Each structure stands twice: as structure tokens, then as C-alpha cells.
Amino acid sequence: FSSVELTQAYLQRISEHDATFNAFITVDEDSALATARTADLRLASGDADALTGIPVAHKDIFCTEGLRTSCGSKMLDNFVPPYNATVIKRFNEAGAVMLGKTNLDEFAMGSSNENSYYGAVKNPWNPDLVPGGSSGGSAAAVAARMAPAATGTDTGGSIRQPAAFCGITGLKPTYGRVSRLGMIAYASSLDQGGPLARTAEDCALLLNVMAGHDPLDSTSSDTPVEDYTAALGDRLEGLRIGLPREYFGDGLDGATGTCIQAALKELEAQGAELVDISLPSSSLTIPAYYIIAPAEASTNLSRFDGVRYGHRCEDPADLHDLYTRTREEGFGDEVKRRILVGTYALSAGYYDAYYKKAQQARRLISNDFRLALEQVDVIAGPTTPGPAFALGAKSDDPVAMYLEDVYTLAVNLAGLPGMSVPAGLADGKPVGLQLIGRHFAEARLLNVAHRFQ
Ligand code: GLN
């Protein structure tokens, strides 16, 4: 079948089901079909890449030239970027078809997708549950078969956690592997784009397009890119998989733990060796992240001032009034909370007590991983402490929400690649097995994840 037929089939799924799940903020049928027609010509002429003609949904945090990019915020409700993010450019060059832009927590701040200006996303397994966040729209779109694959971003778990909650596969690459140009910044030292798809193989195909050096992103790495599909079939004999004690303690839900153990047994049966390890600074992860990420966010979000782009309040009396009312009206509660926390942590007099301490904790956390990954090839554990929770269950309790991220944040603080792979169901809800690797060892993670295909 042709790309046009495939694209039409997905657009049809979206029009039938997205009223229930709210996974998309923007769908541009005409441009999707126009790209599909071009892709069909390319396919006919034999000049095709693996993703030519394949529909993909993009998190609405990647700038798309001529197509509104909201970042889930009222602040950018009217923002039409004048250029494409490098990630979008790469998908376009490969001939992939953009189905639309997916819903997310406002400025990627959240773990449930309830912080979006465009309303919450519902979990396709059960619409009373959250899909996870912040890439909840991307995960729900793939899980509900409204897109075969999607992009996401992960600052502290936003690819892995929604992938886990929606029963799909998600990969957060090594920091610097995927360009951040045109990806609206949340916490610049932690943000990383990556793929969400049904299988490890599909994630590998997407990463092949996304990964690579970008001279326009100074934190982009020039480490050579591999073919991420090449090692998928490698055997696991001799592979050492470390199980951090700290990830299997009291905080882990029983049924989730049982699923994870079964998945680990499976890897052992295929020849991997399971090794007990320790990441002793794990308890510092949540406090360090929830200082560093808001600190960076508070400076990144200072650009939304009503002057250059995005929302502007009506009839400002003076410049100060323009700034304050624009930001009061344009940002939601969680974004304001992060700006307040971050500004406070960076202010003279508190910098040493909070920000500097958090950076020191970050170093300890990184060192834990460096030592552990000298002993083992891959680290494995749960992606989340429990399965998807009910909509509204934690939305009034920011600390309960932040605790959801206990197993995912450290990977970003250490800049490592991490994946979530479907590991079965706990009480009928999907569970994610998290795999963590050495810097730039994405191919290894995909190889282990492929065992569950
Ligand atoms: N839940 C975390 C936060 O709210 C992580 C979000 C993300 O990875 N973008 O900051």
C-alpha cells in the first residue's frame, strides 16, 4: 500500500479516537497528505529511506516551520515558528510524514500530562488513567494506534515514564546525541529528544534519523552515529545486567515488582548475568533534580516576556505591567511554581545552600553510575514505582507527583541513555522495564530491549 493510504488510515484513526484521548493539539491533514504524495513518488523512483512515507507524530515542543508550536502553553498558543527544529528537518529529509503535533504538559513540566493548556491526555488502556507525562500525547498516540511512532523529549523521564504507562517503548538518548536546536528549552543541561514507538526496532529506525552532530547546537556530540538496527539481533550471552538495590526497595509497588522480576528472569534465561549493584546516592536524586531543573527553567522561561513572541496582555500600562500580566496570564500553575522555586534557588544568598549543593549531589549521582557501569554493561530496574494512576489522583499534590520520577531522573542528571520497555501487566495496567547504559551505548540498550519484541 502507498504512503497516502497509510497516512489516510492514521488520520482516520485520529478523527475517530482522539476526541476520547486528546493526544493531538494540532493535526494538519492537507500537509500530511501532500508529504505522503511526495513520498510515494520517492518510493516509486527507488530513492527511499527506511522512514520515507511513514507517518510520525511530533511532540508539540519541536518547532515546525509554519505550523503552530504551543509547548502545551497559553503563552505559545499563537506561536508559529519561522524555522524547523533540527529533529523535524531530519524527519523531513528522510521523507517521513508529519501527522500532527502531540499534547504535553506545559513546557514539559509534569508526570501526568494534566498540566497542558489544551487539557489532559487520557491513557488508551483506560481513559480514567493518566498516560504519564510530559510526552503523554506522543505515548497515547502510539498506544491508541493513532500514529506508528512519535517523538518526545525527556528531561527527567518524559519519554520513559509515558512509554511505561502506555505499554510502549521509549528511548532517551545520551545527552548530546540528538540536537536540541528548535526544541523548546525546559532545563538545557538535561533535555534530550528521542523516539517513542511500539518496539525497540522501530525506536532504532527513528533514532537512525534523529541522532547526529548538529553544528548549530553547541552541546551536540560529534561521536559517530551507528546504525542502531545493526546489533538488534545480538545474543545476550555474557552480558552483565546490574540491578540497583535502591530501585527494588519499599517504594516499589508489589505487582510492578513481580512484573519486573519476570522480565529479568527472561533476560537471564537468554544468557544475561544478573548482578546486584548499589547506587548509594539515589536518595539525593529527587531533591537535586527539583532544584536544578527549575533553576534552569526559570532562566529559560524569562524569554516569554510579551515583547518578542507569544502571548501579550491587553493594553499594558507600562513595561512592568506588560511583563507581569503577560506572564500571569500566559503561564499555568506548575510552570509558575517552577519559576518561583528556580529563581529562589539561584538568588544571591541562597545559591550556595541550594543550587551549588544540588550540583554537588549531581556529581555524586553521576559517579555512582560511572562506577556501576564499570562493573556491568547495562543497569535494569523499574521505570516507575507503580503503574498509571487515576486522573486527578495527584494533581493537587506536587510532591506526590515529583515522587513518581524517582527512578527516571538520575539518568538525565548523569547524561546517560535510558529506555523503557513493555514488561507485562500489573493488575491490567502496563509496566515498564527501565534499561540504562553507558554514554552512547544506545545500540546495546536497543539490543536488550529487542528481546521483548
Ligand atoms: N516529571 C519531570 C518534571 O516534571 C520530568 C519532565 C520531563 O522529563 N520533561 O520535571
Image: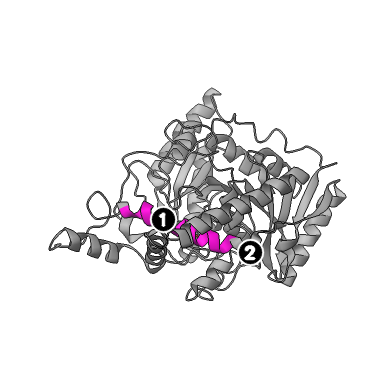
- Residue 166's spot in the image, x, y percent? 61, 60
Q: Can you see residue 23?
A: no
Image: magenta residue range: 285-302
**Residue at 35% across / 38% down in the picture?**
83
Residue 45's spot in the image, x, y percent? 52, 23
Q: Is mark 1 within 8 Å of ligand 1?
A: no
**SS for callout 1:** helix
Vertical arrangement, residue 201 with respect to residue 380, above or below = above
Q: Position of residue 203 (x, y in %)?
A: 62, 43
Magenta stretch: residue 290 in it?
Answer: yes
Q: How is the image coloured?
A: one colour
Using the rendered image of the protein, determine whether residue 355 is visible from the camera's viewpoint.
yes
Q: Label 2: which residue?
A: 283
Q: Amino acid at mark 2?
A: Ser
At x 72% / y 51%, what residue is drawn? 379
Q: How many marks do you count on the picture?
A: 2
Counting residues from the start of the chain, the first of labels 1 and 2 encountered is 2
The crowding category of the residue bearing disc 1, from other C-alpha atoms within 10 Å (few below 14, some 14 to 19, many at least 20), is many
Q: Position of residue 312 (x, y in %)?
A: 22, 58
Residue at image location 61% in from the left, 46% down from the top: 416
Magenta span dominant secondary structure: helix
Reading the image, the residue beneath label 1 is: 297
Asked whether residue 292 is drawn in magenta, I would say: yes
Residue type indicated by callout 1: Ala
Residue 168 drawn above or below residue 93: below
Q: Element at badge 2?
A: helix
Question: Residue at the spot x=52%, y=58% of the render?
Answer: 357
Q: Is residue 336 left or right of residue 368?
A: left
